[in-house]
Amino acid sequence: MANVFKTKFDVATIVLIPACIGINYIGKLFASFLKLPLWLDSIGTCIGGCLGGPIIGGLCGAANNIIYGLTTGDNITLIYALTSLGIGIAVGIMARLGYMKSFGKALLTSVVAGFVAVVISTPLNVIFWGGTTGNVWGDALFAATQAANMPVFLGSFLDEVVVDVPDKIITLIIVFFILKGLPAKLTTLYENNDEVESLD
């Protein structure tokens, strides 16, 4: 547990960070363009967390939101840098504890990441946007909950659950297979003593 947050800022990590941010950026653009019921903006964050640890994962996530928001004028994205920070940290911790070493454990990691996103995002939704998320499908559910006179916080929570949990499941499945496909020579560059995120 002592090495969970240990981070190496070497050449390999410095190269990893912009690569992961770029993956996030492209994923978010893709999902936004196709109006998918998913975000797809955390693939790079999760790769960064799995290889570089929770600090790198959090950095990749937050930086992507800030860059995307500033370059596209999407102010909503800027607010959720906190959520992306949380996702990167959560996935990085899970990976360091060995929860990306098998498909089943990766699924558990995805659920944890999804609920971390929900817990952080729901209050932000309520404070800044009246409970909506900005996702068409999720907001349709939110509208239905409000039509049924459910509390705004509960409606926003459910809005987040139906978007974020499936999104993180798909994201972590993709990340799991990406990492499985990486050559050992590459993944060993990110090993940190007895870290457990390196995949066999």
Image (spheres, rainbow, N blue to C red):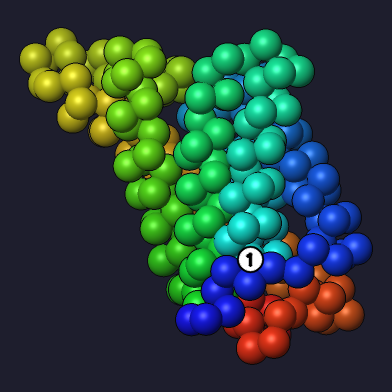
Instruction: Tell whether 78 sits left or right of 52.
Output: left
Farthest left residue in view: 149
What is the quadrant of residue 52 in the picture? Answer: bottom right
Q: Nearer the viewer, residue 147 or 80?
A: 80
Q: Is 150 on the left-hand or right-hand side of 9?
A: left
Frontmost residue, 168 versus 123: 123
Residue located at (42% from left, 43% from top): 117
Give the vertical position of 84 relative to 65 (above or below): below
Count of numbered marks: 1
Residue 173 locus on image (x, y percent):
57, 59
Mark 1 sits on what residue?
A: 53
Relative to residue 9, is residue 73 depicted above or below? above
**Pointer 1: residues within 10 angstroms few (<14), some, or many (20+)?**
many
Q: Position of residue 185 (x, y in %)?
A: 88, 80
Q: Residue at x 63, y 31 (%)?
A: 65
| Picture quadrant of residue 73 | top right
As helix, strand or loop, the secondary structure at mark 1 comes to loop
Q: Is residue 66 left or right of residue 189?
A: left
Q: Check the image and report above or below for 119 versus 79.
A: below
x%, y% of residue 24?
Answer: 70, 40
Quadrant showing the C terminus: bottom right
Can you name the residue that lies furthest to the bottom here? Answer: 194
**Residue 182: where, in percent of width, then height?**
81, 70
Compared to residue 44, the image places residue 161 above or below, namely: above
Q: Amino acid at mark 1?
A: Gly
